[in-house]
Image (cartoon, grey):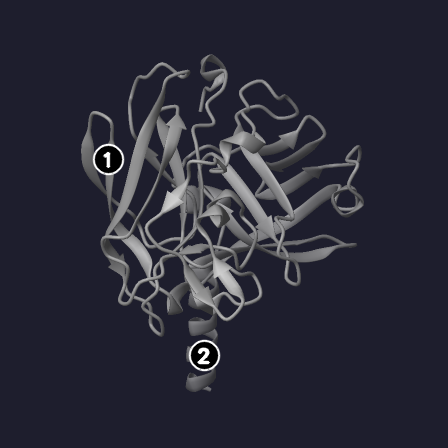
C-alpha cells in the first residue's frame, strides 16, 4: 500500500513539473497573453488558464476548424515544449517554438509551420502587433557561409536559414564541431533572431544528437562582440545596435566560437535566422 501511495505522489510531482501554463514558460506575470497571425487568427491565453482560438474567418480550413475554447497544457520533453489542447470535440498536440514575441506551432507528419503568431497585449485588436514579412527572413543574395554540410544528395545549405521548415537547418561542413565557421550577409535594423539546433517535429532527438551554438562572435562594420546563447530551440534575440537608422544597411559576420556538443554527431546546426521585425515600434507596448 505504501509503495502504491509513493507511486501516486511521484506521478503527481512529475505532472506538476512538466505541465505548465504560458506564463511560467515565458517568465511573465501577465494573466492574459495573445498571439496573432492576422486580424482573423488569434491564440488568446486567458486569465482562467484557458486557450481561446479565434479562427472562424480564417481561409485555412485546418485553422478554421480549431475555432473554440480549450483547456491547455505546455509540457516539456527534452529541450522542446509541446502544447496540448482539448475540448469536447478536439484534442491536438503541437511542437512549439516560443518566446515573449513569437509563437510557432508544428504538427507531426508535416515539415511546414502549422501556425505562427506574434505577441499583442490586445485581445481581438491588431494594434501593438508586428508581423513576419517574407524579406525579413534571412534570404539575401549576399548570404554566404564558410562551409555547408552535404550528406549523399542532401545539402544543409546556408539558404536554409531563411525557412523554419523542419529538417532544414544550416549545418557547417568541416571536420569537428564547426568552431571558427561563419555566415555573413548584409542587414538592416538593430537586431536578429536566431533559432538554434536541428529541429524536426518527427525526429526531435536530432536536436540533442547534433551540436548547437553556445557562443557566437558578432562582427559588423564598426563593432565586435560575443554573445552567449541558451541551449534551446526557441527564438533568441541578439541586439546589434540599440539605436540605428532602419534604412541603413551594413555587413554582419556571425562566427561559431563555442558549442553545446551533440550526443551523437559533432556537426553544429542553426535552424533559422531572421532580421529586425520592429515595424511601427511606437505601437509596441509589451
- How far across and how far down the image is residue 83, in percent? 57, 53
- How far across and how far down the image is residue 53, in percent? 69, 39
- Distance between the alpha carbons at the discs numbered 2 and 1: 53 Å
- How far across and how far down the image is residue 133, in percent? 57, 29
Mark 2 vs 1, N-terminal side: 2
For disc 2, the marked residue is 7
Examine the image and state in which quarter residue 201 appears: bottom right
- What residue is rendered at 39% in x and 43% in y? 144
Say which of 189 and 201 sits in front: 189
Where is 211 relative to 54, above or below? below
Is residue 46 something one can see in this rendering? no
Answer few, some or many: residues within 10 Å of disc 2's Cα (few below 14, many 20 plus, some between 14 and 19). few
The reply, left or right, for residue 107 in relation to residue 179 is right
Is residue 200 something one can see in this rendering? yes
Say which of 163 and 229 sits in front: 163
Where is 179 relative to 60, above or below? below
Tell me if label 2 and label 1 are in contact, CB under 8 Å.
no
- How far across and how far down the image is residue 193, in percent? 40, 38
Say which of 110 and 99 sits in front: 110
Answer few, some or many: residues within 10 Å of disc 1's Cα (few below 14, many 20 plus, some between 14 and 19). some
For disc 1, the marked residue is 219
Disc 2 is placed on an element classified as: helix
The reply, left or right, for residue 170 in relation to residue 262 is right
Amino acid at each position: 500500500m505504501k509503495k502504491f501511495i509513493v507511486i501516486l505522489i511521484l506521478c503527481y510531482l512529475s505532472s506538476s513539473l512538466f505541465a505548465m501554463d504560458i506564463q511560467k514558460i515565458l517568465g511573465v506575470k501577465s494573466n492574459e497573453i495573445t498571439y496573432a497571425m492576422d486580424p482573423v487568427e488569434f491564440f488568446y491565453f486567458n486569465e482562467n488558464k484557458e486557450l481561446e482560438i479565434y479562427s472562424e474567418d480564417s481561409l485555412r480550413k485546418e485553422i478554421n476548424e480549431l475555432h473554440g475554447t480549450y483547456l491547455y497544457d505546455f509540457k516539456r520533453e527534452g529541450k522542446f515544449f509541446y502544447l496540448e489542447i482539448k475540448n469536447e470535440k478536439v484534442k491536438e498536440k503541437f511542437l512549439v517554438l516560443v518566446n515573449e514575441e513569437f509563437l510557432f506551432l508544428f504538427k507531426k507528419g508535416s515539415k511546414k509551420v502549422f501556425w505562427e503568431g506574434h505577441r499583442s497585449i490586445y485581445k481581438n485588436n491588431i494594434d501593438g502587433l508586428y508581423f513576419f514579412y517574407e524579406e525579413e527572413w534571412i534570404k539575401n543574395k549576399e548570404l554566404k557561409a564558410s562551409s555547408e554540410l552535404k550528406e549523399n544528395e542532401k545539402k544543409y545549405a546556408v539558404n536554409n536559414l531563411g525557412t523554419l521548415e523542419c529538417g532544414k537547418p544550416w549545418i557547417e561542413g568541416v571536420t569537428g564541431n564547426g568552431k571558427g565557421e561563419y555566415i555573413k550577409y548584409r542587414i538592416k535594423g538593430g537586431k536578429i533572431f536566431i533559432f538554434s539546433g536541428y529541429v524536426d517535429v518527427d525526429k526531435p532527438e536530432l536536436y540533442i544528437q547534433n551540436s548547437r551554438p553556445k557562443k557566437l562572435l558578432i562582427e559588423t562594420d564598426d563593432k565586435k562582440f560575443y554573445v552567449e546563447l541558451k541551449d534551446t530551440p526557441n527564438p533568441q534575440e541578439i541586439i546589434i545596435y540599440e539605436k540605428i537608422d532602419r534604412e541603413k544597411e551594413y555587413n554582419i559576420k556571425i562566427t561559431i566560437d563555442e558549442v553545446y556538443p551533440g550526443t551523437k554527431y559533432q556537426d553544429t546546426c542553426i535552424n533559422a535566422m531572421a532580421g529586425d521585425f520592429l515595424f511601427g515600434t511606437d505601437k509596441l507596448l509589451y
